[in-house]
Image: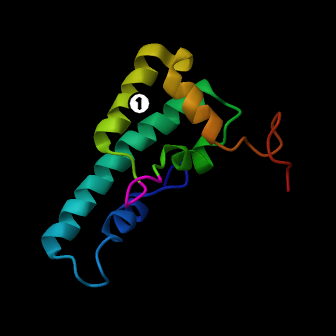
Amino acid sequence: MIGGDSVEAIERRLLAKYPEGSPSAEIIEMARIEAEDLFEIKAQIIQRMALYDPTGDWMARGARALDNPRTTSGEESLERLYDIWKDLQETGPLSDEFSRLQEKVFLKKGGPGGDPIA
């Protein structure tokens, strides 16, 4: 688990569009493969963002910054995630993606401007 997400959670979201018990074994396997791919690139993005933005709670809740509520599964496409990763690699903290993601993530508890320590 990284950033509050896991392969299993992504797979569940990908399969949620199918009525209970209806996806075939092939669909389940394809969802598993897609979930692994999505998780891998999300993990890379989250780790990079944690490096660039230490005030953000990337390792615990950073995956939520990568959600796309406009899709059925709530997941960004793999292609879009690779574009985000490429932008972060090439431009770093000066990239538009860095700023966009930074606005979406919770700050660490007790950090400057962050959630109070509970």
Q: Mark 1: give few (<14), some (14-19) or many (20+) Cα within 10 Å.
A: many
| Type of the residue with mark 1 | Ile
Residue 4 pos. (x, y %): 55, 54
Residue 6's quadrant in the figure? bottom left
Q: What main secondary structure does the magenta stretch of the protein show?
A: loop
Q: Is residue 50 magenta?
A: no
Residue 106 pos. (x, y %): 68, 44
Asked whether 107 or 40 is in front, the reply is 107
* Image-based side of 30 in relation to 117, left or right: left
Magenta extent? 69-74
Identify the residue at the far front of this view: 70
Residue 94's quadrant in the figure? top right
Where 73 sits versus 18, above or below?
A: above
Residue 97 pos. (x, y %): 50, 27
Where 18 sits versus 102, above or below?
A: below
SS at mark 1 in the image: helix
Where 73 sits versus 85, above or below?
A: below
Residue located 73% across and 42% down the image: 108
Q: Is residue 72 magenta?
A: yes
Quadrant of image for the C terminus = bottom right
Residue located 33% across and 33% down the image: 82
* Image-based side of 85 in relation to 66, left or right: left
Residue 59 pos. (x, y %): 58, 44
Residue that carries the numbered disc 1 in the rendered image: 84
Residue 102's quadrant in the figure? top right
Identify the residue at the far bottom of this view: 21
Where 108 sits versus 7, above or below?
A: above
Residue located 41% across and 15% down the image: 90
